[in-house]
Image (tube, grey):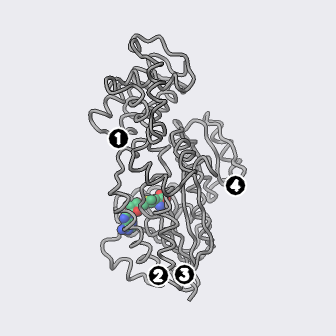
């Protein structure tokens, strides 16, 4: 049995709580882990994975159980375990669970149900991604791998691995990415000395492939136009050996405050933060930068492994509003690029309407830019990490 009866009780309690209060899953999980601080690593891992998997597969499991028992989270859990190839646990709460009926119902389920996605998203993703969609959708129902980025300003992968090992955290090199380590258990990472010394940042494998596309060098002037809490600004600073200038901008002040703390820990002192308060903030910076990174707000359809509850919160109207905003940001913020410089547009979406189609529309309206390189990372197709897209554009005039 992959989970003990005691862990199963907490899984069911957490799911019921999330359903009743609409609380974010990570908050509810954090609270239980604090309460059950006597749990061993294996129990903690099993609890977290099972909650996220249940959330991700909830549509399929509810359909499988039929309308009479959709509220029965014990039955959802039992069904999921059996569908994953385990023996049905002998818990009394599973009495009445009829796996033959489950299999019969699933045999007639539409594809959106067996893949466990909302209809609207399944329809759009099928239309945009064709035959690749079911593979991507299934891969995004799996649990994510944890990756960290080695902060080259402070250490090397080998030195970091050694320090992490002394603190009980095992890590492995990733052949295709020299600054990346894979970590089996992320629960202790933020408590380590290595973290507090700023030797690494938690960052997905795909996300770590965006900053290198900007082809930065020490001394350049770079702007990160939608910096958030600065995952990619910090990476750019490391690639620039802390020399030059990175202006990190976002509309949210609290994200900039987090970035400042992270920069201090990472030993980065060439990032200036600036809140975007009106269109003038960007207009004033016309033609001022060698490199412009636009990691635009998006549906996050590439990171469902990490946020499985997000797929139930997202709505078709969000996609429409986001594609509109992405087009505007690309058009206006790319003006900050000097002639001869590069703009990198990036999303953590798998949908071409937020990616290739945005770039095609931009290039059609801006003949001074040309497409130099594209990165398309699709879970289950060509990456073990999250889904990302990036386009590197050159300003030629
Ligand atoms: C994908 S996230 C950025 C993640 C970040 N680059 C990182 O690597 O951690 C997109 C960011 O765009 C910001 N944003 C939303 N609307 C914006 C706008 N009009 N101008 C600039 N940033 C915006 C959001 O606050 C969010 O932090």
Q: Residue at x 48, y 76 (%)?
A: 362
Instruction: Specify whether tag 2 is near ligand 1 (CB below 8 Å).
Output: no
Write down which quadrant ligand 1 falls in: bottom left
- Cβ–Cβ under 8 Å for marks 4 and 3: no
Q: Earlier in the sequence, mark 1 or mark 2?
A: 1
Quadrant containing the N terminus in the rendered view: top right
Which of labels 2 and 3 is toward the front? 2
The label shown at residue 369 is: 3
Q: What is the CA distance from the residue labelled 4 to the residue labelled 2? A: 38 Å
Instruction: Report the front residue among 109 and 72.
Output: 109
**Residue bearing the label numbered 2:** 365
Which of labels 1 and 4 is toward the front? 1
Left or right: residue 189 compared with residue 277: right
The label shown at residue 178 is: 4
Q: Residue at x 42, y 50 (%)?
A: 121
**Residue bearing the label numbered 1:** 24
On screen, residue 109 above or below 328: above
Decide: few, some or many residues near mark 1? Use Cα within 10 Å; few <14, some 14-19, many ≥20.
few
- Cβ–Cβ under 8 Å for marks 1 and 4: no
Q: What is the CA distance from the residue labelled 4 to the residue labelled 3? A: 31 Å
Q: Earlier in the sequence, mark 4 or mark 2?
A: 4
Q: Earlier in the sequence, mark 4 or mark 3?
A: 4
Q: What is the CA distance from the residue labelled 1 to the residue labelled 2? A: 40 Å
- Cβ–Cβ under 8 Å for marks 4 and 2: no
């Amino acid at each position: 049995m992959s989970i003990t009866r005691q862990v199963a009780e907490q899984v069911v309690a957490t799911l019921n709580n999330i359903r009743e209060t609409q609380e974010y899953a990570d908050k509810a999980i954090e609270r239980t882990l604090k309460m059950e601080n006597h749990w061993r690593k294996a129990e903690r891992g099993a609890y977290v994975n099972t909650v996220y998997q249940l959330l991700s597969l909830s549509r399929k499991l509810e359909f499988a159980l039929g309308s009479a028992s959709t509220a029965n989270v014990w039955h959802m859990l039992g069904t999921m375990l059996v569908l994953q190839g385990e023996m049905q646990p002998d818990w009394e709460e599973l009495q009445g669970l009829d796996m033959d009926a489950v299999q019969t119902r699933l045999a007639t389920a539409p594809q959106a149900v067996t893949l466990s996605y909302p209809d609207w998203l399944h329809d759009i993703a099928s239309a945009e991604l064709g035959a690749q969609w079911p593979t991507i959708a299934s891969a995004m129902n799996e649990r994510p791998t944890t990756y960290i980025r080695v902060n080259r300003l402070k250490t090397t992968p080998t030195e970091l691995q050694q320090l992490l090992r002394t603190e009980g955290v095992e890590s492995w090199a990733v052949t295709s990415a020299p600054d990346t380590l894979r970590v089996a258990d992320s629960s202790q990472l933020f408590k380590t000395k290595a973290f507090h010394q700023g030797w690494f940042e938690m960052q997905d494998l795909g996300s770590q492939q965006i900053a290198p596309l900007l082809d930065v060098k020490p001394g350049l002037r770079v702007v990160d136009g939608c910096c958030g809490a600065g995952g990619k600004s910090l990476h750019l600073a490391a690639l620039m050996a802390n020399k030059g200038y990175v202006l990190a901008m976002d509309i949210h002040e609290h994200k900039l405050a987090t970035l400042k703390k992270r920069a201090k820990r990472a030993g980065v002192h060439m990032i200036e933060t600036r809140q975007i308060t009106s269109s003038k903030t960007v207009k004033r910076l016309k033609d001022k930068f060698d490199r412009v990174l636009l990691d635009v707000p998006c549906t996050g359809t590439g990171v469902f492994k990490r946020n499985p509850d997000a797929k139930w919160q997202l709505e078709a109207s969000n996609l429409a509003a986001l594609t509109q905003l992405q087009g505007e940001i690309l058009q206006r913020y790319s003006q900050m690029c000097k002639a001869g410089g590069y703009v990198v547009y990036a999303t953590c979406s798998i949908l071409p309407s937020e990616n290739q189609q945005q770039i095609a529309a931009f290039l059609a309206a801006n003949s001074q830019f040309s497409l130099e390189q594209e990165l398309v990372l699709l879970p289950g197709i060509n990456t073990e990490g999250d889904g990302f897209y990036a386009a590197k554009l050159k300003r030629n005039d």
